[in-house]
Amino acid sequence: MPRDTSKPHPRARHSHALVVFAHPEPQSFNGTLKDTAVTTLKEQGYAVEVSDLYGEGFDPAERPAHYPERTDRQVFEPLAEQRRAYEQESLPPEVQREIDRLERANLVVFQFPLWWHAQPAILKGWMDRVFVNGGLYTSSMRYNRGYFRGRRSLVSVTTGGPAETFAHNGRGGDIELLLWPLHYSLHYMGFTVLPAFRAHGIHGNGYAYQDAAGFRAHLEDTRQAWAARLRRLETAQPLRFADWDDWDESGRLKPGIKGYDYFIRAQP
Ligand SMILES: Cc1cc2nc3c(=O)[nH]c(=O)nc-3n(C[C@H](O)[C@H](O)[C@H](O)COP(=O)(O)O)c2cc1C
């Protein structure tokens, strides 16, 4: 049975964070930012867990092999198999482990590099498999009525391109738009979505920086800005998205509602 999302989750503690880490190299700058998040959040009194997707060998591909007891052996229907496995408490163990981690957390941080204008495939696949249909979302348990209502999520992304190229007219693409599908998916799951932390120009020497010392200083400044951001979480204004109050019966914005972003908007 889906949980009653009008009440806080019984297992959620106020100061429990999960850091979902999606980079194959612990010694990367993403690894440094992940370590900074763990240290800083612990200093702030959080209990912190890490889902190290590469390190733990998370399989991002949803597929029949994950469901030995199939509802339909002829045709693999991911939504149906997820629902059945949730109801019968036979989810794949690594999916159940991730859900257990999410349920303990009231803050979920995602640390990853921008790869092809989006999150790495391993993180997309984590969403495909862990946000279980029929369990963590249903047609009535979505958006502001979502499973994770009352909990916060925070994306921390690194990009190779410098900050200017991610402006609304930059060649990297407007970063707010690039992150929208991920942010909106978190909103769909009920999370309060805090504005992303963006580390730009993380691309090795000689790209945006003249010398190695200058680049190292940029990395350290960025790391410190991330730590400072994590210390100010309580005052962060969440992103605003359309939700049930804004849509009419057909699922379109009600007359007079302009929308809150470029993806769901009234006719200009
Ligand atoms: C497969 C792949 C795709 C990438 N795509 C982008 C991109 O679309 N935009 C961008 O600015 N950087 C892109 N990059 C650069 C990474 O964002 C950059 O290497 C990373 O943020 C550096 O962090 P790290 O040192 O922790 O790996 C890409 C890198 C890889 C490996």
Image: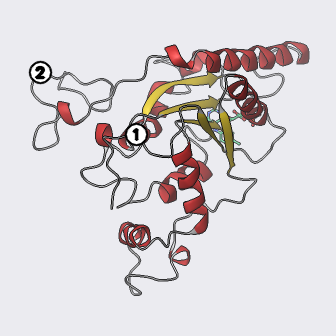
Which quarter of the frame holds ligand 1? top right
Q: Which mark is residue 256?
A: 2
Which residue occupies the foreground of this view, 161 or 188? 188
Q: In the structure shown, which secondary structural element does the residue marked by tag 1 occupy?
A: loop
Q: Quadrant of the N terminus?
A: bottom left
| Image point (73%, 30%), residue name | 33
| Label 1 lies in ligand 1 vicinity (Cβ under 8 Å) | no
Mark 1, residue position: 8
> Along the horizontal axis of the image, is 116 left or right of 131?
right
| Image point (41%, 87%), residue name | 73
Q: In the structure shown, which secondary structural element does the residue marked by tag 2 occupy?
A: loop
Which residue occupies the foreground of this view, 4 or 265? 4
Residue 163, how many percent across, how many down?
Answer: 61, 17
Q: Is residue 18 above or below residue 89?
A: above
Q: CA distance from mark 1 to mark 2?
A: 33 Å
| Image point (51%, 46%), residue name | 11
